[in-house]
Amino acid sequence: MIAPDDSTSRHFIREIIENDLKAGKHKTVVTRFPPEPNGYLHIGHAKSMCLNFGLAADFGGRCHLRFDDTNPETEETEYIEAIQRDIRWLGFDWGQHLYYASDYSERLYQYALELIKLGKAYVCTLSTEEFKDYRGVPTRPGKESPWRNRPITESLELFQRMREGKEAEGAYVLRAKIDMASPNMHLRDPVLYRINKTPHHRTGTTWPIYPMYDFAHCLSDSIEGITHSICTIEFEVHRPLYDWILDVLKVPCHPQQIEFARLNLSYTIMSKRLLQELVNSKVVAGWDDPRLPTLAGLRRRGYTPEAIREFCRRVGVTKVNSLSDVALLEHCLRDDLNKRSHRVMAVLNPLRVVLENYPDGREETFEALNNPEDPSAGARRVPFARVLFIERDDFQENPPPKFFRLAPGRTVRLRYAGFITCQRVIKDPATGAIKELHCSYQPPAPKGQAPEGSKVKATLHWVSATHALQAETRLYDRLFTKENPADEADFKACLNPASLQTVSAWIEPNVRGAQPGSRYQFERLGYFCVDPDSTDDKPVFNRTITLQDTWAKIQQAQRISTCKMSKS
Ligand code: ATP
Ligand code: MG
């Protein structure tokens, strides 16, 4: 489950809860995660889940999963299922506490009737344009609706007609009677209910009226006995309304709304509406496209729940919105994959190497460590024969000064398998392109004996051409070329045209039969994960991430410059 508490996961919300418990305000902490089922969860939601489920677990309380399904137009059963799958995958569990705001429809309706009877709500007949005009702007008070003082009995009757489906969409709304002069626009007689005849994915056509978020949310929290209602910072201005509704009505309890800064991540977008647009316009292959920041996409890409939770922990919880560096997420991922991934050798861009002094038809195997970081991961045997593939980039006919890998006349080490020396470069007579290398081979020195090639400067990965498994690899880059695409006039204009590259690879045969989701490190190339599209005949691997850790580099550079500064 969640990482154990430590100094970096201390934050102001934890402090509020600790103080509430100390003061005896609550015995049990009850939080909720309230997704609207109008899209898939993304890594921003992961931050909210780590907070809500994490705090509940840390304090021995509980966290409810509540589908905030009060908008029949955008919600679908597919999302309900996907959301549950993704929460479980991230490592959280709501136990028995699965709720739907739509299950509270009758109770919310009764609360609305109660507000009308108290003279705190009225049915308003203004058109949408009039409504906007009456509302005013933040710097200027609004005007009271001519329907504001409609008799309570008339409002009750009209609201009942709305509920019975007797009124047309847009004809009326129910509004709270608060203060049209308030500098807080949310208090200027906000709409509580609207007429909407779109069938709902759960309740069908039972309800032709739907509560607005601000009305449904605080009351759902209260009905469920939530103690701390944690939400993102943009709801801070809604808090007076949250409190007003719960103060005016007789409710089971009055939860405390606490706001924190939402997670924004560089080089991606987090709005469900924009993500939906990418999915609908087929810019990406679906909600689980490995380039998306959705949990389904990250999972398919090969991310681990542990890496995502660690990232959320390190980002921390504050009140100030900011853009988190995707390099930190990638750093957390590499850290985790390094510990858990078995190494294998694979070649993405092959160059044929023929070992002139190795008999045709001979085969042997070499022992290779599965994970040098983890001795308990054991070893495997990798087949070796006369014809190998190495990476085309690992050879240069005219090597520049700092190129230490293979070149004519030069010797390099083959990982686990001895040494090769390049004797001849064979070219295509028509094009001049390099076709293959002819090399001499020297087996590894027996254990305990000083290796002859100990002066060689490079170690290459390789596969046996006859044994290697051919696979499709999908290499990903950032989906956007701009750091904050949501800030652009047209976010689709900064899509990275090279965000997906499909490349054939030759992989050592040990990966045969690996199931979707299996993770490997292809030595020197990155971490890869078997895609669900994979079949026995045609394995498909996603590159989760390359090996270069830009975050670690940034941190190191910062340490050096701080060090220099403190010396000077
Ligand atoms: P969008 O604006 O993209 O539709 P949303 O906030 O409306 O997203 P919900 O399904 O309502 O999405 O979100 C469920 C919970 O997750 C809410 O409590 C919300 O505050 C939280 N959440 C959503 N996005 C983020 C984010 N980027 N960072 C932290 N929490 C988030
Ligand atoms: Mg929302």
Image: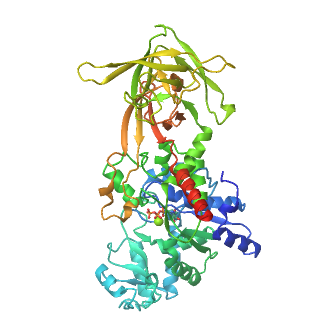
Q: Residue at 62% across / 64% down in the picture? A: 566
Q: Residue at 33% across / 83% down in the picture? A: 131
Q: Residue at 47% across / 19% down in the picture? A: 421
Q: Quadrant of the C terminus?
A: bottom right
Residue 423 in the image: state x and y as whole percent.
42, 17
Locate residue 304 relative to residue 469 in the image: left or right. Answer: right
The answer to which quarter of the image holds residue 555 is bottom right
Locate residue 449 relative to residue 319 in the image: left or right. Answer: right
Residue 515 in the image: state x and y as whole percent.
52, 31
The answer to which quarter of the image holds residue 145 is bottom left
Q: Is residue 357 or residue 153 the one in the foreground?
A: 357
Residue 322 in the image: state x and y as whole percent.
49, 66
Relative to residue 284, is residue 73 depicted above or below?
A: below
Asked if one can make out residue 246 in the rendered structure from this viewpoint, the answer is yes
Relative to residue 163, is residue 282 depicted above or below?
A: above
Residue 399 in the image: state x and y as whole percent.
40, 31
How was the colour assigned to the protein in this rendering? rainbow
Asked if one can make out residue 62 in the rendered structure from this viewpoint, the answer is no
Q: Residue at 31% across / 47% down in the picture? A: 497
Q: Is residue 40 or residue 359 the one in the foreground?
A: 359
Relative to residue 41, is residue 179 depicted above or below?
A: below
Q: Is residue 186 or residue 403 the one in the foreground?
A: 403
